[in-house]
Image: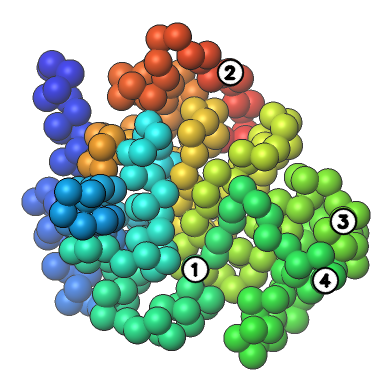
Amino acid sequence: MCSSARDDRLVNESSGTGPDDKRQEETLKKSGKTTDAVRLTAVRKVYGKRDSQVVALDGVTTRFDRGTFTAVMGPSGSGKSTLLQCAAGLDQPTTGSVMLEEHELSEMNETELTELRRDRIGFVFQAFNLLPVLTVRQNVTLPLRLAGNKPARGRVSKILDQVGLGERSHHRPSELSGGQQQRVAIARALISDPAVVFADEPTGALDTRTARDILGLLRHASQAAGQTIVMVTHDPVAASYADRVLFLADGRLAGELDSPTPESVAERMTHLGAFDDDGPLPRLEPTRKGQR
């Protein structure tokens, strides 16, 4: 099979529009259920007007199933961050549809979107975005407190134990390392049991060993707790912790890869032109067994 044909097949698979998928969707619709945490259909995002227009997303159709861990990759300017922002309701597509569970985001006003993001979406960014005057426990419970809710008995302690911060619940961010602060951010994202966690370069500011620990936590949240995770990254090693990698190029889907390895991801990224011939290649350290 030639390379272009293989890439076309991968794009079609990633759109989730095959006959079997359609039959499954009809069955699920009749039952009132869906396997999708998030679905994008023909999403197009254009910035600027007329001659200054920039097409960030160009008819993207894909889905993120419940309980899966997906990495989104592509060259600089491929539309990775725009896809995340549209999928999370942080930005509105110019055209197309974004469904989060049963919610069509284009039909919601800003207040409804704010409440949806607060209650059903978790965020983990490269910057930890912790409030320095609050303790670890207070930072983790902040989304619930803003919603006027209280965590279930023992929920906070359980989450903090899962991310390895059970004994640091009363520390403030300034008393924590960068890796520990990112663990707080992950706990905060998970505390409300969201439909999906969006992570934008969550290990970009961390050293290799700490990054591996953080990726292991995200992987565990998906495998053990059934948490849906969508992570934007430029790092093939980080992407190898995911169940699949979704590739973008020039605002369009450029294929996907199941059960990725650092080497297979780097090869695909090189094919897409993400690593030029003169630039340094990413450092590929094999993931340890049991961490993937």
Q: Amino acid at mark 1?
A: Ile
Query: Disc 1 and disc 2: Cα gap in Å?
Result: 32 Å
Q: Earlier in the sequence, mark 3 or mark 1?
A: 1
Q: Tell me the residue at 47%/25% (across/down).
A: 261
| For residue 114, above or below residue 166 | below
Q: Earlier in the sequence, mark 2 or mark 4?
A: 4
Q: Which residue is mark 3?
A: 174
Q: What is the crowding at mark 4: few (fewer than 14 residues within 10 Å), some, or many (at least 20)?
A: some
Which element is circle 4 on?
Answer: loop
Q: What is the crowding at mark 2: few (fewer than 14 residues within 10 Å), some, or many (at least 20)?
A: few
Q: Earlier in the sequence, mark 1 or mark 2?
A: 1
Q: What is the crowding at mark 1: few (fewer than 14 residues within 10 Å), some, or many (at least 20)?
A: many
Q: Which residue is mark 1?
A: 121
The part of the image, by quadrant, that contains residue 35 is bottom left
Asked whether disc 1 touches disc 2, contact meaning CB atoms under 8 Å apart, the reply is no
Q: What is the crowding at mark 3: few (fewer than 14 residues within 10 Å), some, or many (at least 20)?
A: few
The part of the image, by quadrant, that contains residue 75 is top left
The part of the image, by quadrant, that contains residue 278 is top left
Query: Disc 2 and disc 4: Cα gap in Å?
Result: 37 Å
Numbered badge on residue 134: 4
Numbered badge on residue 283: 2
| For residue 4, above or below residue 48 | above
